[in-house]
Image (cartoon, coloured by chain):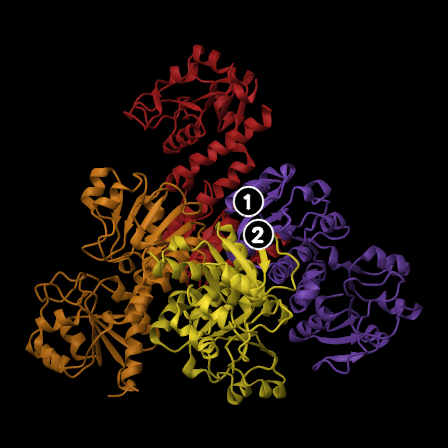
Chain colours: A yellow, B purple, C red, D orange
Amino acid sequence: MKKSDIRTFGIIGGDKRQLFLAKSISDSCYDVLLGGFDRLESHGSLSLCNVKKAISESDALIFPLPSIRTDGSLNTPFSNENILLDGDDIEIILKKPVFTTMKSRFLKAYPRLSDGEIFDYGARDDFAILNALPTAEGAIECAMREYEGTISGSKCLVAGFGRIGKILAHKLVLLGANVTVSARKPSDLAYVKALGYNALNTENLRTVKRFDIAFNTIPKLIFDRELLMNTDTNTLIIDLASLPGGVDFDTAEKLGIYAVRALSLPGKCAPKTAGEIIKTTVFDIIKEVYR
Amino acid sequence: MKKSDIRTFGIIGGDKRQLFLAKSISDSCYDVLLGGFDRLESHGSLSLCNVKKAISESDALIFPLPSIRTDGSLNTPFSNENILLDGDDIEIILKKPVFTTMKSRFLKAYPRLSDGEIFDYGARDDFAILNALPTAEGAIECAMREYEGTISGSKCLVAGFGRIGKILAHKLVLLGANVTVSARKPSDLAYVKALGYNALNTENLRTVKRFDIAFNTIPKLIFDRELLMNTDTNTLIIDLASLPGGVDFDTAEKLGIYAVRALSLPGKCAPKTAGEIIKTTVFDIIKEVYR
Amino acid sequence: MKKSDIRTFGIIGGDKRQLFLAKSISDSCYDVLLGGFDRLESHGSLSLCNVKKAISESDALIFPLPSIRTDGSLNTPFSNENILLDGDDIEIILKKPVFTTMKSRFLKAYPRLSDGEIFDYGARDDFAILNALPTAEGAIECAMREYEGTISGSKCLVAGFGRIGKILAHKLVLLGANVTVSARKPSDLAYVKALGYNALNTENLRTVKRFDIAFNTIPKLIFDRELLMNTDTNTLIIDLASLPGGVDFDTAEKLGIYAVRALSLPGKCAPKTAGEIIKTTVFDIIKEVYR
Amino acid sequence: MKKSDIRTFGIIGGDKRQLFLAKSISDSCYDVLLGGFDRLESHGSLSLCNVKKAISESDALIFPLPSIRTDGSLNTPFSNENILLDGDDIEIILKKPVFTTMKSRFLKAYPRLSDGEIFDYGARDDFAILNALPTAEGAIECAMREYEGTISGSKCLVAGFGRIGKILAHKLVLLGANVTVSARKPSDLAYVKALGYNALNTENLRTVKRFDIAFNTIPKLIFDRELLMNTDTNTLIIDLASLPGGVDFDTAEKLGIYAVRALSLPGKCAPKTAGEIIKTTVFDIIKEVYR
């Protein structure tokens, strides 16, 4: 297969992100078939059809994030039906490149597909990095909504200096916040200082005092009972860590600390950007694989 | 009267802003009496009392924004009662400095008070400028909520380069937006260019094409029928102009352009900052008047 | 005369700025004759000629900044000759629009020209505002050169919040400096706070302590003997005020305070930008006057 | 040895950075002996002495960057003498922790010292990262000095997204430049995009057109003959790569492209910051090693 053999993309299920993905692909002069969006009557100039047709009449298939539900049915929030792939679908899919997420869950539901060409765009590092931008903006939107003062002039703690922490700290400082970043690796701490933030070693994070907002980006229980007991009660905590999360919400509530869980921000806050990121990643895979 | 004679402030009615104002004044080591907040059971260490007591036992009085309702009753959203000042109140108030807003409406309801010392903090230039910051942040929060992409990478138009336009354009560019500012005065257009924004003469604003978000800050009907007919339908319009506003919302709806009215943003989005701004302004007046 | 009658610009004397001005005008598809640059052998595709020819064969004339020397001769640093306008030149010039600076000095030397159309582009507000950008960058270049630390992390005082102070404070804060701005007008002080700088009333500027760099933009003797005696000796002072300047340099030297005078920064540090600003201003005048 | 056993630091040779290092250590309430600075008559309240005394009367020793000259003599630019360590010095040094740079060159000259405790602070990752900030500022100072326009509004290419590229791109964009970053790794390219820069794959860097300034941070010959032949002649090239550098300077000169080599920027442009970074790194080592 060559890059030029792909002319029509079948987009199978998904939410608003996949609609923006479809638009973005279409703007690059490819055809798009949207399958599994039957609750929409129309969507601009894009073709809506049933899943079977989208699978059979396209050259490559894109599944959404998450790709399937726990019962193995396709993730089609814009459809009223519960759609499962049947044997015929599988045979057709096996002949086409498939771009999906949560590959192992997908293959567990449809093991036969492991003989095909399946690319997990959701597992790629560049996908995660690109999504750090809409995540950081979503976190700021959340802070603006929940915090009763302005970000400008506020004192913010960003726990963690990974993908999201890097972009989030950068944006907060530009908005006029006084930003402290906690990190663990000496090289990260050096970057934190070189970029002009206040630096704190996560290991030594025993108290959170005099911060207006604390963002957690570390996928570990950072705000445990002990730390929460040494946190100002008027500090707003925004937890960006994926489940089970980085905050003991029960204890926070008991102590009267307001803590908010902010998950899946790209899809919720910026589906357009999130859809364009899926497109960028899928197209990058195609360029790498089919020269 | 001297500055040092003011030891206790009576805060008469108002919303969350006045509560943060009370907290901020209290943090500066003055006493505060909150009158007209009877729906609150307590508010930290601050004294809640009835309006009569707050008036009689304080050295200076602060009324909120707006100060009174159209029927002449006090603006007390945290009270279940409809409170009017009576003759006794008036006599006591006449002996104390009064800080209020919408002075002419206030004096129309209580003409006798024109013999007293009444300062309209809401009419001051510095009050308006300081509020431009929470207004700009509120506008960005609104844009983040309503726009389906990220601010970073978006194309924004800011119509008007007054107080709000200046701060808003500054924040947007820091968040990574591509910002065009329309202004009218040659000196404003020169500042727009010197600060690195794209410049557009408001006089020549005949079309709004290829913008993701258009913010109007000009208190005139800028987005009239004609301009809206030359605006991309997928441009989000956020109108920050005070009523009657700068957008023909009926026409916008007919044309399928999504337009949002964003008013009173400091009070809604950042009551803490808005309360602190009231304190700063009242204290500045005191410093100017009572040396 | 109409706008379209101007096809060839004669640029009479000046430094590098006028060469970039010539290039910029030429890039807009006008012809340019450069007179008074005889020490250059060539300058790209631009026509070098003597002053007489540049005057007679062009449709409009642009004199530099400063326009003439104190002896009335043209300001032609790129020429070895001392050039004066003679009666013939004057008669020809009278028929053409003239764009110059320091108009009163110019007309004092050549009073006959007061019958012609003379525009002082150097006196315009927009010209001064646009030049605030290269001035601010030049001030930062000066600070980077003279200060032994980095701007990032330094404590800077910007005295004055006029054209230059506004842009300079903005750039410094973006580079990571901790910026304090001193201003006098309440509305300026409000802007200073709304933009997130530390605010100081210039009236109360009695000591300058714990600043690494102090920029003066106020055209008055701010750093007089008294203030210098209350300034840390390791504070670097950069004086941007036009002559006689805002710093008592003799006293500074005696006290061991390092103070630098930074004048005419646009021409020295960014002649390309300065030339483009002259073009923008001259073209704006043409648009205003010849519709 | 314990942390608390170190009370006096001997600073042996070096340039202005070591003087600022001495000041910074002294500000933290340690004693400092400066050896090898005999051309200075005094240096504030710091003690100047000969190298022998600085070695014998201190608890820990800090050598500069570079630590020694090619002939094995100490790097003492502030001394008129050529100083070599003798056997007695060595014996004393062996009993103390030594913080130096270019450890292998140092030990080649004084192999006996390999039995001692020698820490190469110059080889540490955090040292390099912290120095990226003064390097980036120095690069910007260089660009401001050499480029004839303003950084604001200029089009800049930053080749490489390592330590220096990251900070440099960040600063340039804040100053209003339009920034393109070239990188090679997919994750770096994703960060480049997420941070809002234009992205370019270094592999595909075949032409450099329409850039005002190109910064090279990659320690490889990027601007070779071929690329230079496809570079605009009015692009200013600033090479930050350590020797042998990333630009073919001979070819650049022949082609009329102005290229500047900018090396050792922290020491040259910001010795104060560079000295403080040495202190931070040495103190971090002490904290790690002597608990």
**In this picture, residue D146 sits left or right of residue B5:** left
Residue C75 lies, with reference to residue A104, above or below; the image says above
Coordinates of residue A187 in the picture (x, y in percent):
34, 72
Which quarter shows the N terminus of chain C?
top right
Residue at the disc numbered 1:
B192
Which quarter shows the C terminus of chain C?
top right
- Say which residue appears at 26% left-offset and 47% top-offset: D260
- Say which residue appears at 55% left-offset and 88% top-offset: A229
Q: Give amino acid for label 2.
A: Ala
Give the CA separation, mark 1 to mark 2.
Answer: 9 Å
Q: Chain of mark 1?
A: B
Dot 2 alpha-carbon crowd within 10 angstroms: few under 14, some 14 to 19, many 20 or more: many
Residue at the disc numbered 2:
B169
- Say which residue appears at 55% left-offset and 42% top-offset: B199
Disc 2 on helix, strand or loop?
Answer: helix
Coordinates of residue B94 in the picture (x, y in percent):
86, 65
Compare marks 1 and 2 and give the one earlier in the sequence.
2
User: Looking at the image, which is closer to me, D90 or B138?
Assistant: B138
Do we see residue C66 in this rendering?
Answer: no
Dot 1 alpha-carbon crowd within 10 angstroms: few under 14, some 14 to 19, many 20 or more: many
Do we see residue A289 in this rendering?
Answer: yes
Q: Residue B6 got which mark? A: none
Disc 1 on helix, strand or loop?
Answer: helix
Coordinates of residue A165 in the picture (x, y in percent):
46, 70
User: Looking at the image, which is closer to me, A50 or A178?
Assistant: A50
Dots 1, 2 in contact, CB < 8 A: yes
Same-subunit check for callouts 1 and 2: yes
> What residue occupies the far left of the structure in this picture?
D87
Q: Quadrant of residue B143?
A: bottom right
